[in-house]
Image (cartoon, rainbow, N blue to C red):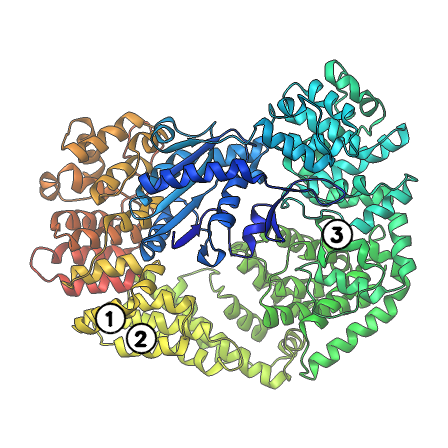
Amino acid sequence: MEKWILEKWVRKLEDVVKAYNLKIEGGALLARFLNPDGYGEYAVVEGGFRQMADDVEARLRRDRYVVIAGPRGAGKSTFLAWLLWNRLRPDAVIPLRISLDDERRHYLLDVVMQYPNALVLYDPSPPVAFDEWEFEQVAAPVLEDLKFLEEVSEIASVIAAVPSEVAPGEIALKYGVVFDARRPELAAAVLREYAQCDPPAGLAERAARYPLIAAALAGVMAGGCKWSEAEAALEKARGDVFTLALYYVDKILGASTPGEIRALSRLIPLRYITAFLQPPYSFVIPLGLVERWFRWEGLPYRRGAALLLAQKQHPVVEAGLGLLAIMAAYEVEPKDVLRDFAPWITHGEKHDAGKFKRNPFSVAEFFLSLYGDRLREEVSKTGCWRRIAYLGGLAQYTFDAYGGEPCAADDLFVQDGEFTPLSLLLLTITGKSGVYAAFADKSGEALGELEAFLERWRRGETITVGDAYYALGLSLLLASAGVGREAAGRALRAAALMLRSIYESAHEKPKEFLVYALSPLGRLAPNEWALFLAMFDGVAGSGNIVREELRKIRRRVDKEWARALVAMLYSKLGEDKKACEAFREVRDRSLRLITEAMAAAAICGGDKCKRMEKLAEELGGVALSPALKEFLKVSSELPVEEAYRLVLRNAFGLVYSALAACYKESGDLKKVAEYSEKAAEIFHELAPRMSLNPYIFAKFDALKARAALGEAVADEFRRLLEDIGYGGLYVDIFPVYLAALAAEGRAEEALELLRRERRVVELSFRGVPTLLFLKALGLDVSVGGEEVFNLVRDFLIPGLRPAVAAILGARVDPHSECARTGNPQLCLRIYEAVAGGGGGEAVEALRRALSHMVPPDLLSKASVREMVLALASPNDYVALTLLLWALAAGDKLSAKLIAETRASGKTGYRVVPGEEAVVIEKTRYSIGAFFKEVAEAVEPGLLKRALTKLYFYGM
């Protein structure tokens, strides 16, 4: 095979080994499983795999598609990895991770078409999905994925490894190779590898009744050739690997007294919850902290037990740990096999382990309630409070060598150069119970260092990312130090500005943990807390926590600039009513006008467009008032006069952008073009001091509006793309540039650019509609119905989705799709009417839905096909795409019916009786009018002008 494409799980070549829990050592492939003393590695048994690989490759040459089916735990994923590393050159691998979600499947087809000899590996259920919950998540899509991969096998070779429990019969019979590594000779090799001696006669046969992981567990239990305990556990577990895991965990932990059991049953649920979403064999608690924990509890230190607790284990072992720890909590009756674990039931901690799932902070809080004094004592003994502050600031992001020298505290929070999940939680807790309280006496020095950072910032000096992280950590320390209001305010002001420095330098977004951790300071200094929340650019993703903090301080802020910030935050959160109320509380006129403009929040009563125009006029009378000066001092590092000039110009630009959006809603394209150009001019002027993006967006809107008006703007589009340079925005705008060329009659230029940059067009969400637009204008462009369907499928009415797929020539399973709707029978009848030309109830249901939206004479001409396309989606963008597809296909009747339907602007029609009513988004008058122009222009041949206006408006 020339090229192999790793699909589904592998991101990049270096991750292949990690993704499959492997490593390469001396040319041999090693699979990581568990031996706690050595990170659990055993050599893959090559004999059985080699013969299997011969069978797979022979089948692959014949059918181009092989499905390896076998029970969970049979070794399928490990075999795939062995096949990869032993039958291929690693440099022949193109590692990709492509989702097989319906709307993204075409990306895989795009890739394999570039490599005719490609091989796709599909593994939806590797060892990390062993437990029941994760297995259920991957089981559902397997059938559809395998059928899709059958299509892929027409242009590439495919090997799929799927659990036999979910392998569809017809696929397995046609392409299947049964694989099960649960064979005595393999089990014997694994037992021998772990125990370092030959297993007794018959033991390998008993181990082979379990998944392959069981042989590794038994081998570890028999370390030093003490086979009796392993034999007894295999016999008592009666083929259940999870019961075997209980014996294994009990053996490795080695708890022999009630005190040891009680201590372990406290810690295991905490590490179990923090390990839940982590990759296998990553550390969930630093090993140094686990070692301290043994000392705090007065337990003899055992390295095997410490590694078992510190690392995320194989899911089977994780299940055993969890079961062992919760036996006491649920007061399990010790009968049958559980009699062997009666001490855990009798002496284990009876706390409610389930509560930790509801709140991750409760894990750290519970740990601190038990061991906080000991941990703070350990931290205090290190004396390196600056390092702790640095770690605390950095913990909001990711551990990296931005600066700071390691100290003795590192092994309490860092493992192998990375934070662990419990570390992150512990470094987030502030107040007297948190680790920072160990250095409460350093609050004066910490505040002094923060002030020094602020002074450097005011002088315009560069603040490094490492400095900013450290400053955030100093604020966390102060949140635990019991400082007063003034100190809290200064700390929050510094934290807010450092946060902005991080955005500008590293483009990182904060976690909501930071708000949680600094909230003690916020309660002391509500004005500065408003400033911090305003700088906290995670508002969109963390709205609830910010909204709750605003509720707490809304009536407590007593500075004009803070009231303005509260109003801006409410506007950003979409709380229009509260935003208007808050803006009315800002008494200083200049400050209110500036911040209303910055928030684009002129929605407080009256006609929006008129209110915006009035705001633009009022901005001309803004003066540098004392309140506005104070606002600029706290929010900008620039001299006040310079900051005032920039903020005022930016406010005008924002208002002009808002006016353009307002007039777009009313369909006034001339006003849209006028105000977008004004905004673009201002943002271009400010770009050297701010960002180029506002200019790009405003100019793009202006050019689209002018193109819709019939102006020749293609060359201006080209210059805009040159300003942008290649990237995400380039990809979004490039297709519209092609459309502008075509609309101006420069077809040859458009086609030549498309030939060279087709991939750019395909990457853009505007790509498919643009290709359809070009084709509708008569250009020789290819675009398939499958591409159209992949773009629109999620926005289609479910009951019509199979019928639309049939019209577009896309492949879906109509029975599966219709089964998810409220009326599967009618959904299928509509599909069958489209596919086979039927009628009856299906046609009548569609005709009734359309009867209130289109002229009767037009409706009388429509077949079920045209009616399905007209009703397919309540979304204007989808309707535009389907209209363009119809015109590109020469189907004028469907195009006219779609345009009339969208022009009607009706709401609340019911397509499938028995389903909940489908409420259509009320078509805005503006785009409805443009749809109407297309409907009227279809017949007389005046289509190009109307279609150009609709395309550029809709894009």
State the residue lying farthest toward the top. 336
Residue 242 is situated, as x and y percent measured from the top left of the image, at: 66, 27
Query: Which label's residue is closer to the chain start, 1 or 3?
Result: 3
Residue 825 is situated, as x and y percent measured from the top left of the image, at: 28, 25
Tag 2 residue:
717
* Residue 740 badge: 1
Bin the neighbour count of mark 2 within 10 Å (Cα to Cα): few under 14, some 14-19, many 20 and up: many
In the foreground, 104 or 209:
209
Vertical side of 27 occupied by 722: above or below: below
Tell me the distance, in whole angstroms, between the alpha carbons under discs 2 and 1. Answer: 8 Å
Which residue is at 66% across, 57% downward? Answer: 554
Tell me the distance, in whole angstroms, between the alpha carbons under discs 3 and 2. Answer: 50 Å
Amino acid found under the numbered disc labelled 1: Ala
Amino acid found under the numbered disc labelled 3: Ser
Vertical side of 459 occupied by 127: above or below: above
Bin the neighbour count of mark 3 within 10 Å (Cα to Cα): few under 14, some 14-19, many 20 and up: many
Tell me the distance, in whole angstroms, between the alpha carbons under discs 1 and 3. Answer: 54 Å
Query: Which label's residue is closer to the chain start, 2 or 1?
Result: 2
Tag 3 residue:
423
Vertical side of 205 occupied by 935: above or below: below
